[in-house]
Amino acid sequence: NSSIEDRIDINKLTHSLVLLSFGIPFIHAGNEFLRSKRGIRNTYNSPISINNIDWSLKYENINYYNYIKDLFELRKSIKAFSEYDEQDIVENLEFLDFHTKPVIGYTLKYHNELYIVFFNSGHTEEKIKIDEIFMKVYEKNENKFNKNEHELYKIFNKQGIIKNIVSYSEKDLTINSMGIEVYKMKNKEWLYYEIRYLFKTNTKACYDNWIK
């Protein structure tokens, strides 16, 4: 009895789990725009009317299609997924324990960057204190990432890639129901030069405005 909106959110969450995991991701043709086989589980002997790809669904579900495109862009932007071998994964991937919350979280180090990924399978949003995140990250990463020297900002949620970056260093995090949130933690000095290069300016005002 799930609503259409809930089913879309579930599909987003499951595809996010696949595309933000190590290994070669596999998506069945048409899943990127919510292809359906009308509830038939095994269609090996079904007619072409069931097994064909209805391309009109791409236009009907264009927002979902664009979300999947954003997921692929996010995966490609995190070089660890393509450059790390088994030992790198063991050394740089850490899971975060939130006890009774229906939230899975992990951190992924890549050079001077740290990504924090949350998956919330619950039907309500979950609040996570920012100090708890910094404490867990600080403990698990040999005291290399701390609140005074690093910025934490959201780069992805269940709407896709976030265009207007917001710093979360002084706020609690809200993980949307049946949703995904991806944050990036980076040294403030490195972040400042990255933004300066992006905007071709050397003004600190640009940095201050960009992260607010």
Image (spheres, rainbow, N blue to C red):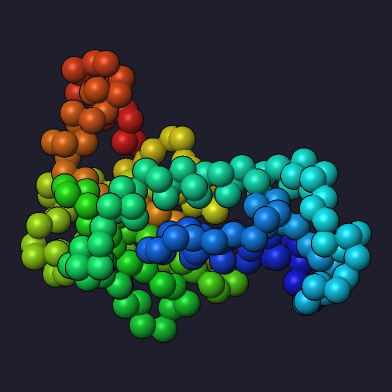
The quarter holding residue 136 reads bottom left
- Residue 92 seen in the current view: no
- Residue 129 seen in the current view: yes
Number of callouts = 0
Where residue 111 sits in the image (x, y, percent)? Answer: 17, 49
Q: Residue at x 30, y 72 (%)?
A: 95
Q: Residue at x 34, y 48 (%)?
A: 78
- Horizontally, residue 197 falls left or right of residue 30, namely left
Q: Residue at x 20, y 68 (%)?
A: 87
- Horizontally, residue 90 falls left or right of residue 142, namely right
Where residue 166 sits in the image (x, y, percent)? Answer: 37, 41
Vertical comparison of 136 with 191: above or below: below
Where residue 70 sits in the image (x, y, percent)? Answer: 52, 44
Task: Classify the position of the N terminus by image quarter.
Answer: bottom right
Q: Residue at x 81, y 72 (%)?
A: 43
Front residue (pair 192, 56): 56
Vertical comparison of 177 with 58: above or below: below
Task: Classify the position of the C terminus by image quarter.
Answer: top left
- Horizontally, residue 91 falls left or right of residue 127, namely left
Front residue (pair 129, 35): 35
- Horizontally, residue 88 falls left or right of residue 125, namely left
What residue occupies the far left of the structure in this picture? Answer: 143
Where residue 129 sits in the image (x, y, percent)? Answer: 32, 65
What residue occupies the far top of the structure in this picture? Answer: 201
